[in-house]
Image (tube, rainbow, N blue to C red):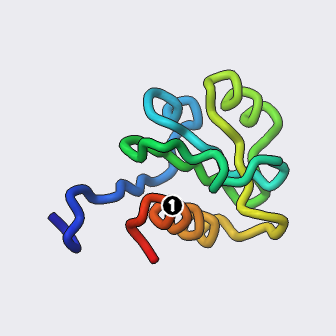
Amino acid sequence: MQSRRPMIMEVSGPVALGRTFPGGHTLMLWEHATTRLADALPDDPAAVRVIVGPEGSFTDAEIGAAREAGVLDVSLGPGILRTETAAVVGAALVLARYGRLG
């Protein structure tokens, strides 16, 4: 147990986009999304995955493939954040939603 948490958040390095979809509730941070991250989070926090793209965003093909795989594209708001900042903000919003932060 780390920091009094029963589980440790997993942060992985870059992976092929197709390898990120199986299982769980997967959300893709995308600046053109119309759904807010907070509005797309499920009631059950057991398996939430947030995908953060590269600088310059995802391609249309990547967004299409993700949608076909059942991934929801979500927004962090009207501003565009750097990749490393978006990852921290996305994780913080997920943790806050489930009462694990703030």
* In-image side of 29 versus 101 (left or right): right
Residue 23 in which image quadrant:
top left
Disc 1 target residue: 97
Of residue 76 and residue 64, the one placed in the foreground of this image is 76
Query: Where in the figure is residue 62, as x and y percent of width and height?
Result: 72, 35
Q: Which residue lies furthest to the left in this view?
A: 1
**Above or below for 22 versus 49:** above
The N terminus - image quarter: bottom left
Q: Is residue 94 above or below residue 67?
A: below
Residue closest to the eye, 40 or 1: 40
Residue 81 screen position, x and y as percent: 73, 69
Q: What element carries label 1?
A: helix
Name the spot of residue 75 as percent of width and height, x first: 74, 55
Q: Which residue is drawn at 51% across and 68% down?
A: 92
Q: Position of residue 21 (x, y in %)?
A: 52, 31
Q: Which amino acid does label 1 sit on?
A: Arg
Q: Which residue is rendered at x = 80% and y = 55% of the image?
A: 31
Residue beneath the point at 79% across and 41% down: 59
The number of numbered badges drawn on the structure is: 1
Residue density around tag 1, few if under 14, some if 14–19, many if 20 or more, within 10 Å: some
Name of the residue lying farthest toward the bottom:
102
The residue lying toward the viewer, choosing from 25 and 80, is: 25
Left or right: 84 in relation to 30: left
Seen at 60% across and 43% down, the residue is: 27
In the drawing, does residue 30 fall left or right of residue 95?
A: right
Q: Is residue 39 above or below residue 18?
A: below
